[in-house]
Amino acid sequence: MSRKTLTTLLLSVLAAAWALPGAAQTPLAHHPIGVRAGVTSWGSISQFHFGMHSDWGELAPSIALVPGFEIGVGDEFTIVTLNGDVLYRSTELVSPPWQSYGGGSLSFNIIDGPHSGSDTDLGVSGIAGVSHNLSNGHTMLWEIRLGIIDSPDFKFTMGYSLF
């Protein structure tokens, strides 16, 4: 993937993250933008990934839309993933300031390998995680993703809300 394509993709995602929350039917969370990083395993590929996510608010009670993007590097591959996460947030399993969540993700995966050129997959993943509301008003998260269709087999991610 060329540097120009990657830059255009990154700027498009950032613009959407700032512009589209206004279209949500319910108010946004206090800190809708965050950063994330972790490890990815996909077949024989092991990578470090980093990216951003944006909490676009609730679609229905306890159901949130949290899109994001990640860039994975390692094993001579670069993988760019655009995620459309739909999460069910539960407080029944843990006590505040903790919150558990689970859900699914429809992802657009762009894979650039050393000898194979670029490939694009539409994937589906399952998600399970916990978040912790910090005293400074920000949130930490820890999540696991398991690939169901054309997605990484396993991802472990840690995240932090910025604003």
Image (cartoon, rainbow, N blue to C red):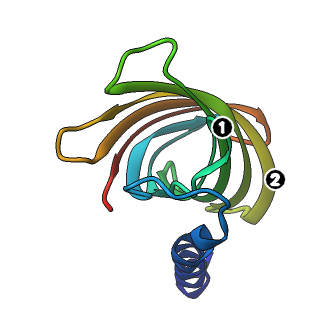
Q: Give the percent coordinates (x, y) of residue 116.
A: 73, 61
Q: Amino acid at mark 2?
A: Leu
Q: Amino acid at mark 1?
A: Pro
Q: Does the residue at mark 1 contact the one at mark 2 (Cβ under 8 Å)? A: no
Relative depth, front residue between 132 and 128: 132
Secondary structure type for disc 1: loop
Occupied quadrant, residue 21: bottom right
Occupied quadrant, residue 132: top left
5 left or right, relative to 161? right
82 left or right, relative to 116? left
Residue closest to the far left? 136
74 left or right, relative to 13? left
Give the labeled residue for mark 2.
122
Residue closest to the far top? 93
Q: Residue at x 28, y 47 (%)?
A: 138
Q: Which mark is residue 61?
A: 1
The answer to whether residue 153 is visible is no
Q: Give the percent coordinates (x, y) of residue 7.
A: 52, 82
Q: Give the percent coordinates (x, y) of residue 121.
A: 80, 55
Q: On screen, 139 above or below 76?
A: above
